Amino acid sequence: MGDTTMLPVPAVGTTGVSRFAGILSSLRRSPAGFIGFVIVTLMVLITAIVPFFLPEVAPNVKEILLPAGTPGHLLGTDNEGKDVLIQLIGGGRTVIFVGFFAAAISTAIAIVLGSLAAYLGGWVDSVVVTLADVFLTVPQIVLLAVLGAFFKLDSPFLLALLVGGLSWPVLTRAVRAQVFSLKEREFVEAARLLDLGTVRVVFVEILPNMASFILMNFMIGVTNAIYQLVGLYLLGLAPLTGSNWGIMLNRAWIAGAIFNDASLAWILSPICAIVLLLLGLVMMTRSLEEILNPRLRDR
Amino acid sequence: MSAQELSPQDTVRTPLMTLDGVSQVFSTKAGPIRAVDNIDLSINPGEVLCLVGESGSGKTTAARMAAGLARPTSGQVAFDGTDIWSLKRNDFTAFRRSVQYVHQDPYASLNPTRTILQTITAPLFKHGLVKSKKAAAERAVELLTKVDLTPAENYLSKYPHQLSGGQRQRVAVARALTLDPKLIIADESTSMLDVSIRISVLAMLGRLRDDLGVGFLFITHDLAIAKYFGWRGKTAVMYLGRIVEFGPTPKIINAPTHPYTRALIDAIPEPDPDLTKTKGRESLRSLEIPSLAHLPSGCSFHPRCPQFEDGLCDGAIPELVTIRSGQSAACHVVARDGVPGVGDGGRPDEPGA
C-alpha cells in the first residue's frame, strides 16, 4: 500500500480513466477508509447478487432452532426451521436500498434548500428556515408509527420517501450555515462579477467546496435511515412481509431468542450485519475527504 | 466643484466611469459609519486612476461601489454616462462584462476545487464567446500567455494550490480579461505578493494597460506603487472616506499640496539614514487615526494636521478646490495661503467654503 502512494498520480481527471485511478489511489491512502470501502462494497455486492443463487427458504418443522455450526445450517435455523444464513444474505437488500435512497432524498432536499436559502437570503431564507423548524419538531419515529398504523408501508420506495422526506432539516441548516460562510469568499464574488448566474455559482462554484462535508453527512444519513427502518421493524410498526434484517430481529425478539443459547446466532447475526455495514460506512467517510479535496488528492 | 471637472481635457471625452457624490454609510450599533463620504471620481477610457489611502480610508468600499458590488447609500455611479443601478438586466450584464475586478488575495479569489482551465473558460462558455471546448482551451492559452504564464499549456490542468501567489494573481488577471473589459479595478492586487514578484506583475499590468487600452482603477496604500503604475494617470488621495487631494500622479508625488499627502510623502523612508532624520520637516500633531464612527468636526485631518488653525479647520468641511493647474486639495489653509515652502505655489481660485 505504501508503494502506490509514491507513484505519480495524474493530477487531474482529464480523462475518465485517470480520475478513476486517482480515486482508487486516494482510497488506498487511508487504511481505515479502504477497509470501510471494502466492507461496504462486499456487503452491497453479496446482498444484491448472491440471493439469486440461493435456494428458497421454506419452513421446516423438523429443523427448528438448530444452533450455529450445524452441518448444512452454518448459522443455525429459526423457530420455523428456516436457515438463518440464507435469510441474512437475502435480508440486506431492502435495508441497504432504503438507507441509501432515503439518504439520497434527504441530502438532495438539504443541498437545494440549504444552499439557495443562504445564497438568496430574504424571504427564501425565512421560508426554508421556518419549514425546517416545523419538520424538526415532528417526532419522526412516532409519526412513522402513526402512518404505519393507517397505511400499508410495505413498499421500500414508500418507506425511503417517508424517512428521507422527514430527515432533511438538520442537514439543511448545516448546509445553509456553510454556504453563508462560503458565499462571502472572494472566488464567489469573482464568479458573480463574471455574471456566471445564480445556479452555476451555487452548484458549481460553492457546493464542490463542501462536497466532503455533504458526502459525510450523506453517510450519516444512510446510517440514520437504516436505524429508523430497523427500529420500525423491531417495534413491529411496518408490515412483516418478506424477509430483511429488521424483520429477522423482530421475529427473533418476539420468539424470545435471547433466552435460548441455541438461537443466539439467529438474533445476533442481523445485528452484526447492521453494525458491520454501518461501521464500514463510517470508516469509508475517512477516505472521502482525500478524494474530494484536490489539495489532498494529488499529494 | 467636483474632481472630474478640473482638467479641461477630460471634459472633451466622455468618461468611462464616474462616481458622482457617492457615499456609503454603514449603520452599526456604534452609530452610522461613513466609510465613503461624498466622493467624486472619473475614469476615462484607457486611463489609470490610482486611489491611495491608508487602511480604513474607504478605498476598497469605493472600489466595490464602482464595480457594482455594493450599492451607494447616496450619489450616483455611472458607466458610459448611465447610472448603473437604473440599468435593465441586459444592460447591467453589459456593465458587468465591461468592468472587472482583481482582488487583493490571490489565495482566496480562485476557487480551490476548479482547475485553471475551468476557472478561465467558465465565463467564456457562459457568455457564448466560444463554441467548442477546443476553442475555449485555445482562448485560455492565449489569455494565460498574455499574463506571462508560459508555457500556458502546463498551467491549464493545475489547481490553484499548485501555483505560487504571483502565478495565482496572474490567473486572476487572466480571468478578469476573459470578457474583454474596458475597466479593471485592481484592489491592492499586488500588496500580498513578494516584492520581486510584485514588480513583474505590475509590469505585466502596465503592458495590458498600454497594449489593450484597458482603463484601471488602481487601489493601493503604497505611494511608490501608485508612482510606478500610474505615472501617466491621475491619483486621488483618500483620508477617512473623503478625497483630500486629486491630480496628475507626478504632481501628487513631487509637489503634494494637502498636508496629509505631504506627510505621506515625508513618511517614505530614504535609503540614507541622515536624510531620513532631517527629512521630517513637518511632524504630525497626533499619530492616532480618528474613528470613522466619531469623525472630527470640519476637516477630519485637523487633529493631526501640522497646519491646524483653531476656528478655521474644525469648523466647516473643506471642499476640493483647485490649488494649481489640474491639482486640487481639500484644505482650508492651503486654499487660502497656498502651499507652504513652495514659492510659486500658484494662487488658489477660491477660498474654502
Image (cartoon, coloured by chain):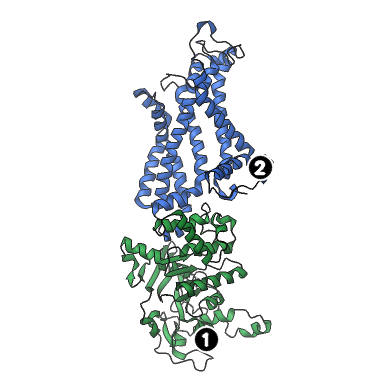
Say which residue appears at 45% left-offset and 50% top-offset: A204
Element assignment for label 1: loop
- Pointer 1 residue: B255
Element assignment for label 2: helix
Crowdedness near tag 2: few (<14), some (14–19) or many (≥20) residues, C-alpha within 10 Å: few
Q: Nearer the viewer, residue B138 or B327?
A: B138
Chain identity of mark 2: A
What mark, if any, has residue A130 been given in the picture? none
Q: Nearer the viewer, mark 1 or mark 2?
A: 2
Res. A184 visible in picture: no
Say which residue appears at 48% left-offset and 10% top-offset: A59
Q: Nearer the viewer, residue A22 or B151?
A: B151
What mark, if any, has residue A4 been given in the picture? 2
Residue B132 % position (x, y):
43, 54
Q: Nearer the viewer, residue A243 or B209?
A: B209
Image vertical order of residue B219 relative to residue A155, above or below: below
Say which residue appears at 55% left-offset and 10% top-offset: A65
Chain painted in green in the figure? B
Q: Nearer the viewer, residue A140 or B344?
A: B344
Query: Distance between the Cα atoms at labels 1 and 2?
Result: 66 Å
Inspect the image, locate mark 1, and give the three-letter code of the amino acid beneath it: Ala
Image vertical order of residue B226 relative to residue B146, above or below: below
Inspect the image, locate mark 2, and give the three-letter code of the amino acid beneath it: Thr
Chain identity of mark 1: B
Chain painted in blue in the figure? A
Image vertical order of residue B213 relative to residue A206, above or below: below
For the N terminus of chain A, give its image quadrant: top right
Residue B161 % position (x, y):
58, 55
| Disc 1 with disc 2 on a shared chain | no
Res. B142 visible in picture: yes
Residue B238 % position (x, y):
47, 75
Say which residue appears at 31% left-offset and 65% top-offset: B86
